[in-house]
Structures are given as structure tokens and as C-alpha cells.
Image (spheres, rainbow, N blue to C red):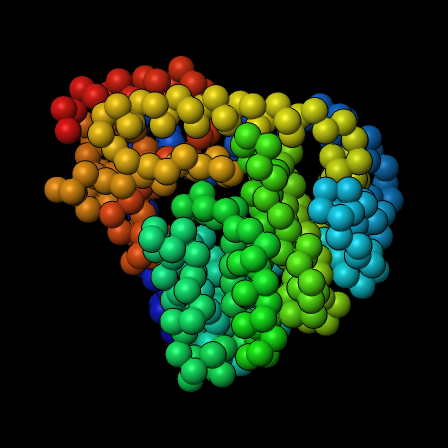
Amino acid sequence: MYSEKLRSLPPYLFASIDELKREKLNAGIDLIDLGVGDPDMPTPSNVIDALCEAARDPKNHRYPSYEGMIEFREAIVEWYKRRFGVSLDPEKEAMTLIGSKEGIAHIPFAFLDEGDVALIPDPAYTVYRIGCILAGGRPVEMPLLEENGFKPDLEMIDEKTRKEAKIIFINYPNNPTAATAEKEFYKEVIDFAAENEIIVCNDNAYSEIYYDGQKPPSFLEVKNAKEVGAEFNSLSKIYNMTGWRIGFLVGNEDIIKGLGMVKANIDSGASNAVQIAGIEALRGDQTCVESNRRTYKERRDSLLKGIEYLGLKADKPKATFYVWARVPEEYDSMKFTKLLLDKAGIVVTPGVGFGRYGEGYVRFSLTEKVERIEEGVRRIEALNL
């Protein structure tokens, strides 16, 4: 019944966890959900007000453009200049997305023919792989290993694969490992891409969730980045707008044009009212962004202190709202996830769900209040691991 491409997608490992969650909730169990990467804090009120006003204007009830309102793209470009010092042309080097996930899933359709290679980090956000498969491409894994700072070793990619590859996906600050990258790494990627004629797609959705003043750079800050690549970003994590579905792609004009050709045939663009709210988010009061960072830092420190006391090992994240923790030696990631859910009512995400190189880890999300995180630590302690 289903297409071969759909049937070829990796199995949905989280299905059994979702079923267990439903069973626990139906039984009245109090679940502490540290699995979902969805901010629990509300969208700022000035952004909501901007949406309400825009929604009442009949001109915003009609079809939007697939490339996005020029006013929103101008706000993106201003924000990139202010935050990263990167200059962009709002008409040619910026595009509105219906959330960055949409753009990430669609960009392989613009540049991959049947059987073409896409270099995919592992462990990683699953959409890189899924978008490639649905477009008919062949994903080739780049292991993200702890001993290499959870960055791919580009020198380990063989000559044949280099020549076959059309796209490379990178993602820093990283989901799920919380690793960050410096400009030196981006230069390596740019040189590698230029030498092998590969398109770089950097996912920078967590750029503003950082700690201790350590601002992550943009891939586009590095010389020649725009010659080979483009960068996805989103208002979802920055302004607590995951449900609004608004993001963007910036960078190389031809890459943006290619994605635009796909979008012109698939969707009709993001709602103008939501884009107007996005303009307010980017140009308006930014105190919510700093407030978010303080909140996540408090939660990060609380969780790390608790799990390290219990013997679970995790590096201190410099960015993102995730903690990537090693599971006890006697468990694999799925068994440990099920133990926490079944015996402690705690939801985490098994590392293997992000790829085979995620085995041996679980991902904690910092999307519950400190009091709930502390309660979760007490429940884990009661397991006597």
C-alpha cells in the first residue's frame, strides 16, 4: 500500500516509548517529561499581540508568497548583522520557512537525484536522514564520537564518497549531543566542501541558547561560507515559538533559489500574520531571550548536579537545552530509557533513536521546571542503580 520510499524510512523507535507513556498517563502516573525538545515557556506577549493585530487585517488572510514577506526577510538580515556581523541580501540570500524542519526536509529534493549521496551526522536530528531518503538520495553516516568532540572527522570520508556526495548536513550547537563548534571547524567544512563541490547545510536552530557568555558563531561568519553553503535557523527555540512554525534559510543565493523552486511547487509559504509576529520577535524587546538562557542554565546545573551525584556521566553543555548522558554500563540506551519510564515515571530519549552512534547515551531535555527536575533526580536515586 505504501510507497517504497516511505517503507524504507528507519523504524520509529520511539513508538514503543509513546505507547508506554500513554499507558502510564492512562493509569494516572505522574510523568516527568524530559524527553521532548519543546520549550515549556510561553511566547513573549509582544509577539502574541503583533499576531493578534495582524490576524485582524484582511490582507493577511490571503495566500502568502513562498519566499516570504520582504519585511520579514529584512528583519532576518538585520538580526544576522546584529548578532553575527554577517551581511546578507534580503531579496536573494534569505527565505522564510514554515519552521526550519520544513526547509531541512525539502532541501534534498532540490539537489539530490536518485542514488546521490548526502553526508549525515550520526547521532543527529532525524530529519536530515529522512529528507534525504524521501528525495531518493543515499544517506552516508558521519560518526559523531565523544573523543572527537562530537564532530565528524572529515578526513575519514573515503575518496569515492567525497566525489559522490552532493550535500553535507552539520548542526552546531548540536542536537542531541549539545556539542558546539568553533570557526576553525567551519573552515575545515568549507574547504572540504569547496574541494569536493558539496553543498553545506548548517542547522543553527540553537544559536541563542548558550551559557556563560560563550556565544556560538554562525557558519556564515567564516570566509567563503556563502560560496558553498546556507544556514537554517528558527524562531522556535529562541522565542518559544515551536507551535507557530516560522523559520528561515540564509546564505548562498543559488541554494536558496533551489529550495525556493521546490517550495513554489509544494507549499504556499508561511502565514503573513505569523511573519509579522516574527518581525516583532526579531526587532522587539529581547529580554525574553536572556531570561530563557538564565532559566535553562539553572535547570542545566540542577540536572547535572543530580545525575552526577547518582553516578551518571555527562559533559557540561555550553549550549542547547539538552544534556547528553552516558547510560550505566549494564544497560543499552533503550533499556535504560524504559527503566526510567517504567520504574520512575521519567521520560528521556534513547540515544540510539538518533542513530546507531547514539547508542550508550540518553538525552535529557531541560523543558521542565527545576522543582520537577529535582523530583526526577530523587526518583532515579530511589532506583539504586
Q: How many marks?
A: 0
Nearer-the-camera pick, 238 or 3:
238
Nearer-the-camera pick, 174 or 60:
174
Q: Is residue 379 left or right of residue 216?
A: left
Q: Is residue 175 visible?
A: yes
Q: Position of residue 354 (x, y in %)?
A: 36, 53
Q: Quadrant of the N terminus?
A: bottom left
- Outermost top residue: 371
Residue visible at 64% across and 34% down in the picture = 239
Q: Position of residue 143 (x, y in %)?
A: 36, 61
Q: Is residue 341 left or right of residue 136?
A: left
Residue visible at 33% across and 53% down in the picture = 147
Q: Is residue 269 visible?
A: no
Residue visible at 80% across and 63% down in the picture = 92
The correct choice, above or below, for 314 with respect to 102 in the image is above
Q: Splitting the image into 4 quarters, where does residue 255 fall?
A: bottom right
Q: Position of residue 50 (x, y in %)?
A: 79, 31
